[in-house]
Image (cartoon, rainbow, N blue to C red):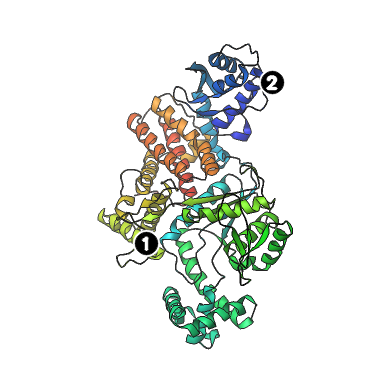
Amino acid sequence: MATIVANKEFTGNPRRQLAKLFEVSLKLTVPDEPNVEPLIEPGKFGDYQCNNAMGLWSIIKGKGTQFKGPPAVGQALIKNLPTSEMVESCSIAGPGFVNVVLSAKWMAKSIENMLVDGIDTWAPTLSVKRAVVDFSSPNIAKEMHVGHLRSTIIGDTLARMLEYSKVEVLRRNHVGDWGTQFGMLIEFLFEKFPDTDSVTETAIGDLQMFYKKSKLRFDLDPEFKEKAQQAVVRLQGGDPIYRKAWAKICEISRNEFAKVYQRLRVELEEKGESFYNPYIANVIEELSSKGLVEENEGARVIFVEGFNIPLMVVKSNGGFNYASTDLTALWYRLNEEKAEWIIYLTDLGQQQHFHMFFKAARKAGWLPDDDKTYPRVNHVGFGLVLGADNKRFRTRANEVVRLFDLLDEAKDRSKAALIERGKDKEWTPEELDQTAEAVGYGALKYADLKTNRLTGYTFSFDQMLNDKGDTAVYLLYAHARICSIIRKSGKDIDELKKTGKIALDHAAERALGLHLLQFAETVEEACTTLLPNVLCKYLYYLSEEFTKFYSNCQVNGSAEETSRLLLCEATAIVMRKCFYLLGITPVYKL
């Protein structure tokens, strides 16, 4: 059997590289079954295992095969496996599982290569080239609150992971900047400021308060309500005075959002509901021409199989709604932006709406029937942020919690903990401030991301800022400690990368090396399942593996110092990339 040199395409991704080897073996073992995908996963009795034998046996046993059962199929898979520098040994366990032990020499060489060539050579390659991630999406004239936290943080991390995996990501902020609420806001603005040109952020003051006051007028004053409804018609009809007032309100709101995004280091491009407005009529026309749109109680709707209510696309008064905008945005993203994967982040409460309009798009032939084939759409739903009472997280006055206040408190608490440890005496005020921000915001993000997004979580500053357990504080400390070990060695780590060699002789060195090499496949899994908690779990276990290594293997002053310093550096590099993907700023001393 010819030797296959490790596949360049999947550098630093042992799972993918093993899949390539077993693909060759499967073709030789069962040539009549060409569509069998290799099933490779981390192993219990080896580093990895191939789980194809059982499934193959159930396919071939009735076809007059030479094999006498799954173990024999497993043996044949080993026999037909191409010789490779990455595989140390293979064995059979139970009903045909093929256990694979990787070569420690190959593992060491792979890590050495990453240290020289950079961690981007370990980036997974996904089959999709361009994706839209639609996230955050607050409403104009309303403040960003704790409810926007999850969408913004999870969306940013998914975008970062896809970008790292060589996907071009269009980060879209689908803000609520169109709709009936603008009628009351504009009329209220005209009442307060007859000369709209003079309106400034300072004059309006608290936009949230402005919204509440206009809503109160709308609910209590029928004459004002009538004016507000007329204002919507004039705004949507393109009246320049109304458009100007609308633009002013949007601008003030947008500036407020920008401050939050800047603090969270989140980048987004706004394409709000209003952007799609000029395209809606044509899209509804296209859907009608395909026989999808029907009259129903004065409105125009699409009946979607599996739902007892239709999807309304034109209201009885001729106005458009969420469904008309969302279908149009999807059409635009598929046809104008040529996106292959469109990912929407909202809370789970909106799941039915998304499933309905996805089904309508399939009915229109915009999307394939199979939801795994591209172009594809996914609704990434998430649970609520809960308070200590297990209800939706609110202030003591039962108000929604402003995102600004949360960020301030995270930073303040983080700074207080650093001052308690005497860091204000050791560091400059800038260092103290930057570290408090990195740790405070990092803690807030990690507490959200480490939870499986489908469940809610209880918000607790005490828990998220704890320096023990699965928290960002613990992980940032672990990273700072590794940097300190490297600094104390007095060695030039960049020089060592070029000349030094790694040996994974001790069991703890080998375990750490293997975990480092599982980084790429973890990012790939987090991207394909759209679950950032997969990456958080990997990062936490990486710090645990490092602790075991450091407890068992002396680094500085040992005979293996060079190799072990390089392992420290490789761990720090992988941790920093994980932090980056999670939107967390690393700290180098704590």
User: Callout 1, which amino acid?
Assistant: Leu
Residue 32: which numbered mark, if any?
2
User: Callout 2, which amino acid?
Assistant: Asp
Tell me the crowding category of disc 2: few under 14, some 14 to 19, or many 20 or more residues within 10 angstroms, Cα based: few
Residue 406: which numbered mark, if any?
1
On screen, residue 319 versus residue 537, left or right, reads right
Q: Nearer the viewer, residue 426 or 3?
A: 3
Tell me the crowding category of disc 1: few under 14, some 14 to 19, or many 20 or more residues within 10 angstroms, Cα based: some
The image shows residue 387, relative to residue 179, as above or below, that is above
**Circle 1 — which element?**
helix
Which residue does the image show at 67% across and 51% down from the upper left? Answer: 363
Residue 306: which numbered mark, if any?
none
Residue 428 visible (yes or no): no
Q: Which of 555 and 549 is in front in this view?
A: 549
Quadrant containing the N terminus is top right
Give x and y (percent) for residue 355.
Answer: 56, 51
The image shows residue 222, relative to residue 71, as above or below, that is below
Residue 487 visible (yes or no): yes
Q: Which residue lies furthest to the bottom in this view?
A: 194
Give x and y (percent) for residue 250.
Answer: 54, 73
C-alpha span from label 2 to label 1: 61 Å
Task: Identify the image quadrant of residue 388.
Answer: bottom left
Give x and y (percent) for residue 414.
Answer: 32, 56
Give x and y (percent) for residue 395.
Answer: 32, 64
Q: Nearer the viewer, residue 473 or 398?
A: 398
Nearest to N terminus: mark 2 or mark 1: 2
On screen, residue 560 versus residue 41, left or right, reads left
The image shows residue 35, relative to residue 452, as above or below, that is above
